């Protein structure tokens, strides 16, 4: 079905529009046609078309693929692999220590990796409910939504810092369990932020609830990492 539509017309932007312009137009159209925003212009079918168009044009790789098909009118199926680029690291880093002084290496890992990562995770995870409470006053208020988007942007910056710290040193073998919990916690936070960011674009509460659930899972993993570290010193 999407092959017969001009996605740029659906989002009411030029094919030369920037990513920011596409995102802005998408938000404007969702607010215009969303049944909870304006009953006089509500159009569920148009929302479906808008969401489908943004799934393509809002993704730089998928947009390039669409543009090639649209411009050249040729099938280039082999480029579909560009739509998804899974990260090179699928498992937590776990290495057997070869350092002669394991206690010194452990203390260094705790200081340079665990404590900074744990602190940042706490800043991200336990601010979410307060941010949602403020936004719930009126999700369609641009200022409130802007504040929530600022929180997500800050959280993404914090997450990048935490990921950098986590990858900066090899973990000693005796903290492999805690390191695994931290790795999966960071991964859930990343997914949660992405879900929450998508909510800010289309106001679909499914993404809000999914983001909250991913943060809840991440909080549990953080707790398990803390317990694994505490168990080492008993």
Image (tube, grey):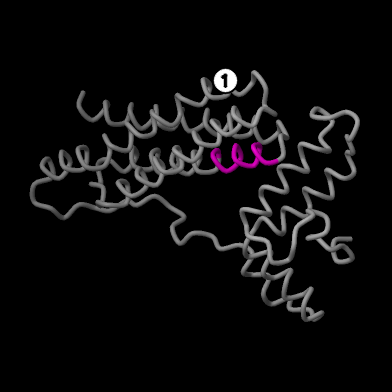
Residue drawn at the location 46% of the way across and 25% of the way down: 127
The image position of residue 28, as x and y in percent, is 74, 42
Residue drawn at the location 67% of the way across and 74% of the way down: 79
- Residue tagged by mark 1? 134
Residue 50 or 22: which is nearer the viewer? 22
Residue 151 or 88: which is nearer the viewer? 151
Neighbor class of circle 1 (other Cα within 10 Å; few <14, some 14-19, many 20+) is: some
The image position of residue 114, as x and y in percent, is 28, 38
Check the image and report above or below for 206 versus 132.
below
Q: Using the rendered view, name the quadrant where residue 113 is placed.
A: top left
Residue drawn at the location 48% of the way across and 33% of the way down: 218
The image position of residue 200, as x and y in percent, is 64, 37
Residue 146 or 59: which is nearer the viewer? 146
Residue drawn at the location 28% of the way across and 37% of the way down: 116
The image position of residue 57, as x and y in percent, is 70, 59
Q: Which residues are magenta?
A: 192-201
Report the side of 119 relative to 149 (left or right): left
Report the side of 48 relative to 152 (left or right): right
For the C terminus, the quadrant is top left
- The residue tagged with tag 1: helix, strand or loop? helix
């Amino acid at each position: 079905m999407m092959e017969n539509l001009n996605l740029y017309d659906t989002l009411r932007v030029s094919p030369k529009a920037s990513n920011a312009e596409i995102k802005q137009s998408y938000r404007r159209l969702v607010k215009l046609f969303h049944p909870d925003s304006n009953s006089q212009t509500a159009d569920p079918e148009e929302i479906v078309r808008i969401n489908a168009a943004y799934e393509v044009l809002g993704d730089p790789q998928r947009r390039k693929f669409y543009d090639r098909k649209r411009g050249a009118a040729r099938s280039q199926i082999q480029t579909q692999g560009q739509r998804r680029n899974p990260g090179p690291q699928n498992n937590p880093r776990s290495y057997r220590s070869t350092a002669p002084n394991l206690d010194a290496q452990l203390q260094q890992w705790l200081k340079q990796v665990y404590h900074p990562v744990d602190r940042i995770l706490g800043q991200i995870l336990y601010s979410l409910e307060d941010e949602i409470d403020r936004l719930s006053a009126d999700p369609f208020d641009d200022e409130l939504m802007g504040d929530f988007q600022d929180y997500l942007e800050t959280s993404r910056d914090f997450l990048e810092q935490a990921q950098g710290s986590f990858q900066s040193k090899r973990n000693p073998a005796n903290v492999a369990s805690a390191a695994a919990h931290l790795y999966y916690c960071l991964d859930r936070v990343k997914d949660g932020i992405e879900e929450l960011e998508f909510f800010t674009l289309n106001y679909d509460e499914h993404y809000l609830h999914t983001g909250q659930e991913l943060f809840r899972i991440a909080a549990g993993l953080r707790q398990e990492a803390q317990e694994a570290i505490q168990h080492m010193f008993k």
